[in-house]
Amino acid sequence: MITPSEVEKIRAEFPMLSTKVHGHPLVYLDNAATTHKPRAVIERIRQFESEQYATVRRGSYTLGEEATEMFEGVRKKVQVFIGAKDHREIIFTSGATQSINLVANSFGRTFIGAGDEIVISHMEHHANLVPWQLLCLEKGCVLKVIPVSDSGELEMEAFKKLLGPKTKLVAVTHSSNVLGTINPVKEIARLAHAAGAKVLVDGAQSVPHTKIDVQDIDCDFLAFSSHKMYGPSGVGVLYGKYAVLETMPPYVAGGDMINSVTIERTTFAKPPGRFEAGTPPISQVIGLGAAVDFLTGIGMERIFEYEKSLLEYGTKVLSGIEGLRIIGTAPHKAAIISFWLEAAHPHDVITIIDREGIAVRGGHHCAQPVMARFGVPATTRASLSFYNKPEEIDLLAGALKKVIQVFG
Ligand code: C6P
C-alpha cells in the first residue's frame, strides 16, 4: 500500500500540484477528466524534443532511425503494460475517442450490416455510444442497451437475454466515468464470445487505475487515452487482437499506411501501420512511454489499493453530509464519487468551491443517458488519483458544507 510519506514524495514529482488557485493550494480532484504530468514525462518530452527529435518510420538518417527505435520501443512498453501478446496489436491513435471511432468505421462498417445488433450499456460515455448510433443510421443495424441497477451495476441477467445470433459486437466501458462502477468485463467477454460477438472494452477510466491484462479479459479491442494516465494529451491507444486487426480495412488513408501505391491502386501495410496514416504524434508517444514507466515504477496493484482506500474514506466523509446523494454505489468501484446536492446545482457548486482552489467537475460528464437513468441533469464529480490525500477530501467536504449554508 502506498504510504502517506510516499504520497508526499509522489506529489513532489508533479509541478502542477504545487500551484495555487485563487490564492489557495490546488486541490485537484478531476482526474477522470485528465491527470497532471510527473516531471519524468515532462522531462522526457523536453529531452526528446531538444536533443533527439526527428520524424519516425520515414528517414534513413541516424536521428530518424534512433527516433523510430524509441517510438517503437513505446509500443512494446504499452504491450507489456496491458498484457498484449504482440506489439503489433498496439495502434497509436489520438485518444480513446478516436480508437473507438476506428473500430466503428473499420470493423463496424465491414462486418456489421442491416439487422445486426450491437450491445452497449446505459452507462457509456458518448464516445462509446454516438459512433455506434452513426453506424446504425448508416447500416441499419440495431443498438441494444444493458440496463443499469439503482446501485449502478450492469444487470447481467438482462445482458444475457440481449445476446443472440444477431449480436456482432458488445462494446462496454470497463469503468464508468460517472458511477465509478467497475464492470465484469471478463465475464462479459466470455458471454459475448459464446454468442459469436466481438468485444470492445472502453478502458479510458480503468487503464490508469488498475492492472490490465487483455489476454486474461480476452477482449478483442481495448481503447484508452494517454492524458488520463499521466501522459501527454493528443495520443491514445487502440489494442486489437492481431487476427481481428488483420481482417479490418484502413479507416484513415494517407502516408505510411501503404505497401505500394500506383495511380490505379494501393495495397495496404499490415497492422498496426495500416491504421496509423500520417505523421504520428511522435513526442506524445515518447511521453506516453515515460508515463507507462512512471506507473509501472509505482505498481498498478498498489495504485489500485491506495485509490480504493481513498474511495472508502471519501465515500464515508461525503455520505455524512446532509442533502448529499451519492450516485453510483456499486460494491466494486473505481475512485470516482459523483453526487447530487439538494442545495445547489453542480455548476454553482463547482464555481463556489473553485474559489477555494478545489477542482472538481460538474455537468453530465459526456454521459447523458446515465444522468437520465438516475433522474438528474448533472452531477458534481470528485475523481481521485494516487497523488490525492485524505486531507483533500476533508477540504472538499468543508467547502461543500459552506455551499449548503449559502444556498440552504
Ligand atoms: N471522459 C471525463 O471527464 P478522450 O476524450 O478521447 O480522451 O476520452 C473519451 C472517454 C471515453 N470513455 C470514457 C469512459 C471516458 O471517461 C472518456 C473521457 C472525460 O469523464 C472527458 S468527457
Image: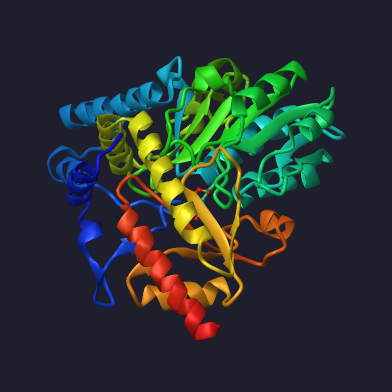
- Identity of the residue drawn at 36% across and 26% down: 75
Q: Quadrant of residue 90?
A: top left
- Identity of the residue drawn at 63% across and 55% down: 367
The count of marks equals 0
Q: In the drawing, does residue 166 fall left or right of residue 78? A: right
Above or below 320: residue 309? above
Toward the viewer: 394 or 273? Answer: 394
Q: In the drawing, does residue 153 fall left or right of residue 291? A: right
Q: From this viewpoint, which residue is outermost toward the right?
A: 115
Q: Quadrant of the N terminus?
A: top left
Q: From this viewpoint, which residue is outermost toward the left?
A: 51
Toward the viewer: 400 or 37? Answer: 400
Q: Quadrant of the C terminus?
A: bottom right
Above or below 127: residue 272? above
How is colour applied across the structure in the image?
rainbow
Toward the viewer: 88 or 318? Answer: 318
- Identity of the residue drawn at 79% across and 47% down: 137
Viewer can see residue 235: no
Q: In the drawing, does residue 246 fall left or right of residue 369? A: left
Viewer can see residue 334: yes
Q: Position of residue 353 (x, y in %)?
A: 41, 74
- Identity of the residue drawn at 72% across and 45% down: 148
Q: Position of residue 207 (x, y in %)?
A: 45, 36
Q: Position of residue 289 (x, y in %)?
A: 29, 34
Q: Position of residue 303 (x, y in %)?
A: 35, 36
